[in-house]
Image (cartoon, rainbow, N blue to C red):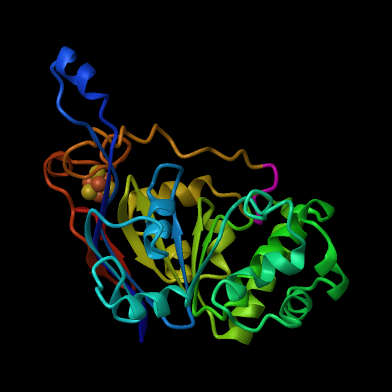
Amino acid sequence: MALVRVKSLTRLFDVSKPLLNRILERRGKAYLTAVSDVDFEVKERSTYALVGESGSGKSTIGRMLVGLLTPTEGTVEIEGVDLANETDAAKVDAIRSDIQMIFQDPFASLNPRWRVRDIIAEPVAARGGDTAGLAERLLEQVGLSVLDAGKFPHEFSGGQRQRICIARALASEPRLIVCDEPTSALDVSVQAQVLNLMSDLKDDFGLTYVLISHDLTVVRHMADRIGVLYLGRLVEEADPQSLFEDPKHPYTQMLLEAAPRMDGFGREIQPPEGEIPDPINPPPGCAFHPRCPIAQDVCTRERPRMRELGAARVACHLAE
Ligand code: SF4
């Protein structure tokens, strides 16, 4: 069963200059399309990874999933409830308590003046719930000590701080956790520990994750389904094995070519070629066509629709 249903999701940001400048320069309003017509579903107790370069819209989608941003068009349904349009406040409140978010920078998301005990228990205390022993229990579950409850965030390493963020996210017994680059601020040696912890907790707590990352290799072993984003558009979606062994979209192929490999010692890693186009003036047709090595005329005219191709869904006119 799908816990999350995203349909035709679009988000624009008004990036216009002030009115007086627009009048003097005879310019209209300008909009940045951060997310454009994105569809996907996340099954209960699964991990869905959203992957793309900086500016691909992945974090904007994450913020719409948790209700920090409203869609310009389209819908996000969690447990069948469209959070942006639901009028029953009690229903919205119940769903909101089922969703938590973990951010990239664990230090910035922890109040430096609060003790860890209060930080972890805060989401429950805010709803008037029972917080006795809660922080200590959760600290043990994320591999820290009960004695850490009395400390302040600056007394911990980056990896430990992210464990505290995970403990706080778990405090309200969520069903869905949206993780925005949860390990990219951490040392490589600590990243695997935090990802392993998240995997274990998923099983223990029956969690569903949406995992946002710029790095395909980070999500490979954790995701059940991977969605690849380019310039706010979903260009390919597949299970990890199909995506890594037989990528269909030229952009996915480029990302994989640029990814570090276990067998790649001594191999020079090429970054993805070309620049991401300006999202205020995206290219017509397929947004990837200025960088695509196999682009044809049709790619410059028509935006490719998502279609099923083997085990994947792909938005490319020429993918076979
Ligand atoms: Fe390349 Fe055309 Fe496919 Fe876009 S639609 S990825 S430009 S081949």
> What is the x, y in percent for residue 129?
60, 82
Q: Which residue corresponds to the image point at 52% horizontal and 45% vertical from the top-left?
A: 258
Q: Residue furthest right?
A: 147
Q: Taking 217 as reference, is 29 left or right? A: left
Work out which quarter of the rendered image holds the N terminus and state it.
Answer: bottom left
Range shown magenta: 262-266
Q: Residue furthest front?
A: 128
* Quadrant of the rendered image containing residue 239: bottom left
Q: Which residue corresponds to the image point at 45% horizontal and 45% vertical from the top-left?
A: 53
Q: Nearer the viewer, residue 282 or 23?
A: 23
Q: Nearer the viewer, residue 8 or 125?
A: 125
> What is the x, y in percent for residue 15?
29, 33
Q: Nearer the viewer, residue 164 or 135?
A: 135
> What is the x, y in percent for residue 246?
41, 63
Whether residue 167 is visible: no
Total marks shown come to 0
Whether residue 102 is visible: yes
* Quadrant of the rendered image containing residue 109: bottom right
Q: Taking 29 as reference, is 202 left or right? A: right
> What is the x, y in percent for residue 224?
47, 74
Residue 263 painted magenta = yes
Q: Taking 237 as reference, is 147 left or right? A: right
Residue 129 painted magenta = no
- Magenta region, main secondary structure: loop
Q: Which residue corresponds to the image point at 58% horizontal and 40% vertical from the top-left?
A: 269
Relative to 259, residue 205 above or below: below
Q: Residue furthest top?
A: 24
* Quadrant of the rendered image containing residue 219: bottom right
Relative to 167, residue 8 above or below: above
Work out which quarter of the rendered image holds the C terminus and state it.
Answer: bottom left
Relative to 195, residue 161 above or below: above
